[in-house]
Amino acid sequence: MIALRAFGDELSRTARLSIPLALGQLGQVLFGVVVTMAIGARRPDLLAAGGLAVALHSTAIVVCGGGLCSGVAIVVAQCEGREDSAHVLRTALKMSTIVSVTLLPLAWFSGTLLELSGQSIEVASGAQSLLRAASWGIPGAVAFAVLRNFAAGTSRAGSIPIVSIAVTGGFALASAVIPWQGLSTVGHLVAASQWALALAMAARFRLHINVDAVARPSVVGALLRLGAPVAIMFALEAGFFSATSLLVGRFGANALAAHQIVAQTCYLTFMVPSGIGIATSVRVARATAAHDRKSVLRASAAGFALAASYMALSTIVLYAFRDVIISVYLGGAHADEVRSTSRSMLAIAAAFQVADGVQGVAGGALRGRGLTGRAAIAGIAAYWFAGMGVAFAASRSYGPLGVWWGIASGLVAAAVALGAMFFADVLRRS
């Protein structure tokens, strides 16, 4: 009875920490969904190029912000004083700025790179115009990710959803009233919105960056030690999804448009377990620092229970309301092939929702244990060997739907590998 009450308390604490984080994650990905919807409403013929560009732009942000800067929450959670946590934040912001600026040349030459990957000239050119225009927003988006992780580590995540939703609403309004000049207009609106996110969060924390302050080597080392393997893991996962987009693009613009609709929907559903994963990493890190094995197990079990329950509901919604979801993106556009392909892809996506949630929380639990390097190795095996292996093989017989069976295989493999790795470590250290 005492153990059950303790688990209930842990479930409540994890849920309270997860809710603002998940809403913040949802707000940020909802932004990508709204961008895709805005393109589909204005120019359905540009949905393939625009959706691909949004996915690639998001990948860069996920790797730098969600990955490299993920250690901020854990390092801050273990800080002893306010001054130390502020120093961690300032150091992370400077590091993120340096890394994000190095990505800008990729946007400039993205059209050539996309053509080399097998995309049509029209899709490559359209994607490049959006990526170039949006590239100046990458440093702002990554800075927001740093501030979001800082908020999680200091248990002050309540302002994240408010800021995210407000900026998303501003983008939706601006995209409806500003005259379009192709996908470059969307790109500039994306960049402006991402800087608005960063500045709003900086104002929330009354942040002042002392550019003359020297970063402590121990802080830089801790952030890199925790963040670099996670960035690799996120690059493997996000890169896996980007690679599947490029693979689907070989089957034509209609298949790619359908793929982007379903991929954006899956990103949206995954953001809740992603927020739970961040909360779980913080709870597990604190329990690990206290050498409390029972609390480690309770924290991880609470995270898995919350994520699996939510994603079970997502499974039902994605399958039962497929036509409604597709219509949200396409409106009244007559795109029968896109609708039909999207419907079949959503059925496959519904099948792997729980596995996707479990692997997201398992990754967070491993970060809390400091096992980010091993998680990255497991990611290589799951996404690129199991996932891409099945995607390439199945696409030969089933076309773009075969690619989605590859995605499902990669996520299931990741859930099994990461979950087994976490519990094996807990048992080994007992």
Image (cartoon, rainbow, N blue to C red):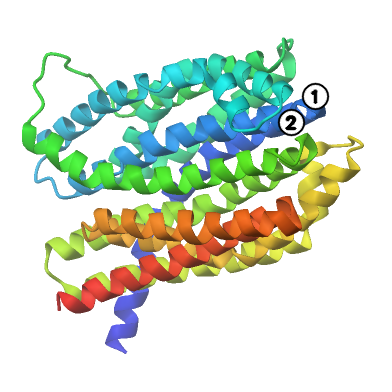
Crowding at mark 2 (Cα within 10 Å: few <14, some 14-19, many 20+)? many
Say whether residue 154 is visible.
no
Q: Amino acid at mark 2?
A: Leu
Q: Quadrant of the C terminus?
A: bottom left
Residue located at (23% from left, 31% from top): 92
Q: Are marks 2 and 1 in contact (CB under 8 Å)?
A: yes
Crowding at mark 1 (Cα within 10 Å: few <14, some 14-19, many 20+)? some
Residue topped by disc 2? 47
Judged from the image, the secondary structure of the residue bearing numbered disc 1 is loop
State the residue lying farthest toward the bottom. 1
Residue topped by disc 1? 43
Residue located at (20% from left, 39% from top): 224
- Of 265 and 284, nearer the camera is 265
Q: Quadrant of the N terminus?
A: bottom left
Name the spot of residue 355 as percent of width and height, x first: 52, 66
Judged from the image, the secondary structure of the residue bearing numbered disc 2 is helix
Judged left or right of residue 362, residue 120 is: right
Name the spot of residue 25 as percent of width and height, x first: 48, 44
Judged left or right of residue 266, residue 382 is: left
Q: Amino acid at mark 1?
A: Arg
Name the spot of residue 219 as percent of width and height, x first: 12, 37
Judged left or right of residue 281, residue 75 is: left
Judged left or right of residue 389, residue 45 is: right
Against 51, residue 9 (above or below) is: below
